Image (spheres, helix red, strand yellow):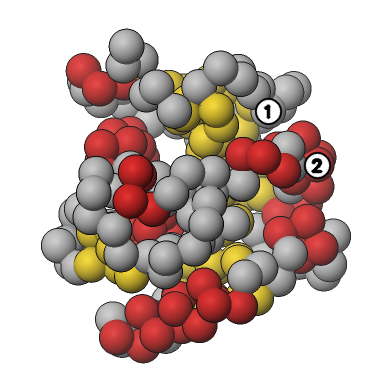
Amino acid sequence: MKSRSAKAATGGREGSVRIIGGRWRGTRLPVPDMPGLRPTSDRARETLFNWLQPALPGARVLDLFAGSGALGLEALSRGAREALLVERDPLLVESLRATVERLHAGGEATPVRADALALLRAPLHGRFDIVFVDPPFDNDLWNAVLAALPPWLADDAWLYLESPADRRLEPGAGWRPHREGGSREARHALYRRSGGGAATLPQVPDDSATSTP
């Protein structure tokens, strides 16, 4: 969730991002003015949730490095059953809690102040159907997170990875690529855990799934 300024990531709308679809469509989520905070862009989230929409109803969602909560709360808005929003920064966690209260979503969204890796190595909060991994780009946490994730995953879980545009990360054995796209700043990729035996999501036509020059 972090590597550029909030102003750059939100097209000049420094201070907020919006939920794009579902029951909270149009709701603004505050983005504190903090160095390095980088919410996933509106366009990237719209594309991602078009890909994921058939898998969202009733899903348990794990939003690591939650930041503004844009990914986890968008999932809830579109039908997910519950979301664990993991964030280390205390200011961001307080902002997440205030947003959850404002949305009357306390029974569905649980903000947790924790280091993502420490949380993954602690006792399980159950298994999750969809996991968002969008860590600070400068901290190089992808491989450590991916190594710790398996006990937290449903057999047919979905994994979203966001990484720098010039770094092609793959989650390794046990995952099948589903869709990917990108921009000048970031690569956006969705994977399905293999071996679960569940049906694959239909391919959703979307021109924005190809890389943007």
Q: Is residue 164 left or right of residue 143?
A: left
Q: Residue at x 61, y 33 (%)?
A: 193
Q: Residue at x 72, y 43 (%)?
A: 139
Residue 160 position within the rendered picture, expressed as x and y whole percent measured from the top left: 51, 38
Q: CA distance from mark 2 to mark 1?
A: 11 Å
Query: Foreground residue, 171 or 79?
Result: 171
| Residue 203, picture quadrant | top left
Residue 157 position within the rendered picture, expressed as x and y whole percent measured from the top left: 57, 42
* 99 lies above or below 210: below
Q: Secondary structure at mark 1?
A: loop
* 87 lies above or below 152: below
Query: Foreground residue, 196 or 169?
Result: 169
Q: Which residue is mark 2?
A: 144
Q: Residue at x 14, y 62 (%)?
A: 26
Residue 191 in sight here: no
Residue 66 position within the rendered picture, expressed as x and y whole percent measured from the top left: 52, 60
Query: Foreground residue, 75 or 28?
Result: 28
What amino acid type is highlighted by mark number 1?
Pro
The tag on residue 94 is none
Q: Which residue is mark 1?
A: 171
Q: Residues within 10 Å of mark 2 (few under 14, many from 20)?
A: few
What amino acid type is highlighted by mark number 2?
Ala
Q: Residue at x 61, y 78 (%)?
A: 90
Q: Residue furthest top?
A: 213
Q: Residue furthest left?
A: 26
Q: Give the label, 2 or 1, closer to the camera.
A: 2
Q: Is residue 42 left or right of residue 76?
A: left
- Lower sequence index among marks 2 and 1: 2
| Residue 196, picture quadrant | top right
